[in-house]
Every structure is written in structure tokens, then in C-alpha cells.
Amino acid sequence: MVRLPLILAALGAALVLPAAAADATTSALASVSTVYSFPSGSFVENLAVRANGEILVTRTTSAELVLVDPRRPGCAAVVYNFTAAGLSGMTGIAEYAPDVFAVLAGDYHFGKSVGVGSWTVFSVDLRGVRLSKVGCRALAGGNLPRVRKVALVKESQLLNGLAPHGRYVLASDTFAGLVYRVDMAEGAYAVAINSTYLSKLATPHGVNGIRVVGDTLYFANSGQSILVKVPLAADGSAAGPYTVVAHNEGPAAHYDDFAVDAEGGIYAVTASANTLVRVSADGRTQTVVAGNWNSTDIAEGTSAAFGRTACDSHVLYVTTVGGLLGPINGTVIIPGALVSIETDSRGAAGLY
């Protein structure tokens, strides 16, 4: 999730919800391992896991799309650099066809400008592209991704999350409080969902991370501190009532992005609260899985995704900012990173 520093002053705002807040519990915390550390000052924003186990990572502070191999420590390479397109930062990424990814890039400048009107949807085709087995900071065999500009969403304020839905990819606009649908073949786009459940409250941030499971859209609203689900029509519009699954309470305790497991549970990162929580499918329980307010284990998490190989399908990968916006203990900032957490869950079928 992309956030501005002023969000930290307004996270405790109250909201009347149609569902009760989840009962928060803490179990034995899972261990967290660092997969890859980025340079200091990196706002590590989002990730997508390939079927071959490699992980694509985006940063708002860079226009480089990075490919990481979690099985080989320190193994990473730049897949593509969107600077040539006049863009400076990246947010969402999602696989919409086998090994073909939609990505968001814009003229984003950390702490200065969110790139209003610049956010562009690209298609990145990685079929045949992989990291070299020798000297893994390069791509194997010189194979390069095929990158195609799909649509410049001129009305956008801050495009953030992405999720595939049939012929479309849905894109959340965090500042506008909207979800767009983008036709990945034709490049046409339109507002698919406009609801108060998506809108911002006391901060500039509304709808953030989004996921589609079957015909249901799940989304986090960071400003309202809620996780919501709604059935979808084929065109990406809402086809039924909105259900608030969970409400996160307490200072700095808001949902950012998340992964959905095979049982319908939601593993959500809580940004400056520095935790990973699991919300049960019925929303009745919320368990802290890893991290805590004063820990650097999940240092300002931004997104999460399950592994896809037989060896890591139970592993949840999380991107972190390292306390860049909200220092741990008020003073500690570490490099943004990709980390891994072993869980008792598996990712929802067809959702990566």
C-alpha cells in the first residue's frame, strides 16, 4: 500500500460499522526470515509469485520491476525499468494469464507527489524468462520480458491494488476511493465500483489491497480500517451487498494488503502496527501471526502472497517498508525487504 506520512496522525478515527470488530487474539508467533533486503530508503510495495517459485517485487521509490528467487539468498535481478516511459514508481502487480502480469507504474515521488493522472497499466509477459542459475543477478539466456502499455488512466489519483477478473483487471484508486476495470486486450477502462465502503475517512487513503476469489472481491480500506467482501458481476461491478468481514481497532492498526487462504481466511499486514494477522473466514477471530508493535520482524508490511511450489505453498511472503513512514519504537528504520513466514495454511485456488 502507498501511504503518506500524515496518515499516522489520524489512524484512530472512529467508524460505525455494520459488523462487529473481530476478537483479537495472539498465539505463538511464527518465525520470520528475510528473503531479500533492498537498499535503504526503498518503499517495497507489492509482490506476485510466479508458478516457478520466483517472486516479482515492486517499489514506489523505483521504476524497476525486480525478480527474486527465494531459494537462493541474495538472488535478484531487474526484469524491466519503466523509467524510459517517464515513470518513477510502481505499485500493484497481479498475474492475469499464465506467467503474464499486469503492473501499475506512475510518476510517483515519495513524500512529494503521488503522480495524479500518470498511472498506467502495463502487461509484462514473462513466459520463457527466468533468473540465471549462474550469477543469479541476470536473466537466463538473454531472454527479455515482452512489455506492452495497456492503458493510461488519466482520471486516476493513486492506482494501487490489482486483481484479475475474467477479461479485466480491477485496479483500486486509493485516493479517489474507486475501483476501475481495465480490459487487458483492448485497453478500455471504466469505473467498476464506487461505494462509501471504498472511500476515505479521516485520512487520504481509502480502498487499498484487493483480491478476487471466484466471483467475490475482497478489499482493504486503510482509512476506515476494515476488510470487506462483495460479490462481482462479470463486468467487475458489485452484484450484491457489501459485507464487512473485520474491523481493525487501535492506533496505527489498519489493514493494508492481504492474501486469502484456501479456507477463506485473510492474512493481512497492518502497516505501522508491524504485524501480520489472520482473520477467520467468518470474521469472528483475528490472530496475530507474526510481529508486534516494537518488532522489526514485519517492519511496516505492505503486501502478502502465498508460495506456489510444492516446497513453499504454505509459506507466506510479505513485503515491508522497514519503518520508513512509522519507525519501529519511534526511532528504528531498517531496509525494506521481502520476508517469509511459515504458516499452517495454503493459498486460495487460482489466487496468487
Image (cartoon, helix red, strand yellow):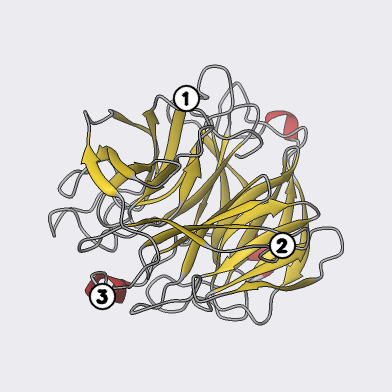
- State the CA–CA distance, disc 1 to disc 2: 30 Å
What separation in Å lies between label 3 and label 1 (alpha carbons)? 35 Å
Q: Is residue 181 above or below residue 349?
A: below
Residue corresponding to mark 2: 236
Tell which of 51 and 336 is nearer to you.
Answer: 51
Q: Label 2: state its secondary structure.
A: loop
Q: Quadrant of the C terminus?
A: top right
Residue farthest top in this picture: 311
Q: Of helix, strand and loop, which one carries label 3?
A: loop
- How many other residues sit within 10 Å of disc 3, few (<14), some (14-19) or many (≥20)? some
Q: In the image, which disc is placed on residue 314?
A: 1
What's the amino acid at mark 1? Answer: His
Q: Is residue 44 above or below residue 290?
A: below
Q: Residues within 10 Å of mark 2 (few under 14, many from 20)?
A: many
Q: Which amino acid is tagged 2?
A: Gly
In this picture, is 249 found above or below 174?
A: above
The label on residue 158 is none
- Give the side of residue 79 with respect to residue 8, left or right: right
Q: Residues within 10 Å of mark 1 (few under 14, many from 20)?
A: some
Q: Pointer 3 and pointer 1: residues touching (CB < 8 Å)?
A: no
Q: Which mark is residue 10?
A: 3
Q: Pointers 2 and 3 in contact (CB under 8 A)?
A: no
Q: Classify mark 1: helix, strand or loop.
A: loop
Image quarter for residue 231? Answer: bottom right
Earlier sequence position, callout 3 versus callout 1? 3
Looking at the rendered structure, the kind of residue marked 3 is: Ala
Q: Earlier in the sequence, mark 1 or mark 2?
A: 2
| Residue 4 horizontal/vertical position (percent) | 36, 72
